[in-house]
Amino acid sequence: MAKDVRLQKMLADCGVASRRKAEELIAAGKVQVNGQTAHIGDKVDPAHDQVAVEGRPVKPAREKVYLMLHKPRGFITTMSDEMDRKCVAELVADIPERVYPVGRLDRDSEGLLLMTNDGEFANAMTHPSRHVPKVYRVTVRPGVTEDQLVQMSVGMVIDGRKTAPAGVKVLEEKPGRVVLEITLHEGRNRQIRNMCAQLGLEVARLKRVAVGSLRLGMLQPGQYRELTKEEVRSLTAAAAKAGRQSRGEAERQAAQARKGGAGRADYPSHGRPAAGKRAAGGYSGKGRR
């Protein structure tokens, strides 16, 4: 590990928490460096500085661990909880290395949750500029209209900001409920639940079934397995590709703005395909009866 690295990066690299969570720990005064309370922006020399979290010494991870956990409903995506709620930490307690969640699934949601002690991997998978597609199986009540499906697919304004276009497909439709497959290309908190609430739909069940090319498959709730080297490489490559696409889109819009075309960016920025282009996500009515 390099000398004079940011404290939150060092904590992530040692498997304590993701960078974002590490920053929260630092801001809360729970991290000490050489016996002194640390602050946001502090740097450390991992080879010489003594770092502790809530009095517990932090040691470098012995080996990198990459897990896929099937998070059951009723568990929160954290390693500890002051309210004594069930945490995903209980489900990986037999792992010798200290791992933490990559991203989040809310308490009432279930499905594929990545866990690791590799700070670089976690940062690559959660960085705002790298949107690895995530696929969800969502059961809504009482039913869904064509207009509601289109609104979800092209983007909706939530908390003053438009969501990125989503892939929406009807998998099953029965009286009183519809099962949808929704693919998200961004990582906003509770996005599907917020979209459905705005449309007047009740989410009866929400399950993440895939992240990039990685699928949950037959892994049972509460169980986990290690990722293969190829799966880790595939996810890392997908994050890198998403980052390049994001930078390319930003550069294209900046160039367009300089030419006086601000506000006329093509899909996906505004959720509408340009002439002659096919939407990357979009609504598919396949499966409707």
Image (cartoon, rainbow, N blue to C red):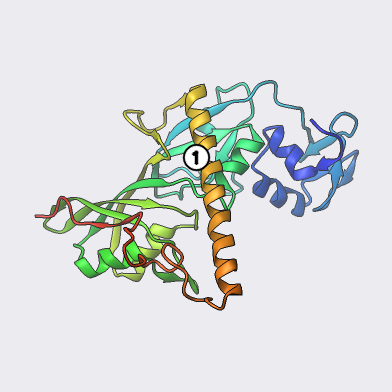
Q: Secondary structure at mark 1?
A: helix
* Left or right of 102 in this view: 135: left
In the image: residue 139, left or right of residue 38: left
The answer to which image quadrant residue 140 occupies is bottom left
Q: Residue at x 39, y 61 (%)?
A: 165
Residue 80 percent coordinates (x, y): 60, 41
Q: Is residue 227 visible?
A: no
Q: Is residue 84 left or right of residue 168?
A: right
Classify mark 1: residues with Cα within 10 Å, few (<14), some (14-19) or many (20+): many
Corner quadrant of residue 144: bottom left
Q: Residue at x 40, y 36 (%)?
A: 213
**Left or right of 134, for residue 287:** left
Q: Quadrant of the N terminus?
A: top right
Number of marks present in the image shown: 1
| Residue at screen point 50% across, 76% down | 263
Q: Nearer the viewer, residue 12 or 90?
A: 12
Label 1 sits on what residue type? Ala
Quadrant location of residue 58? top right
Of residues 85 and 9, which is closer to you in this image?
9
Question: In the picture, which quadrant includes the C terminus?
Answer: bottom left
In the picture of the structure, the residue carrying the numbered disc 1 is: 238
> Which residue ends up furthest to the bottom in the rendered image?
260
Residue 156 at x, y percent in the picture? 39, 69
Frontmost residue, 186 versus 142 = 186
Question: Is residue 35 placed above or below 200 in the rendered structure?
Answer: above
How far across and down, in percent of the image, does residue 114 sit? 50, 36
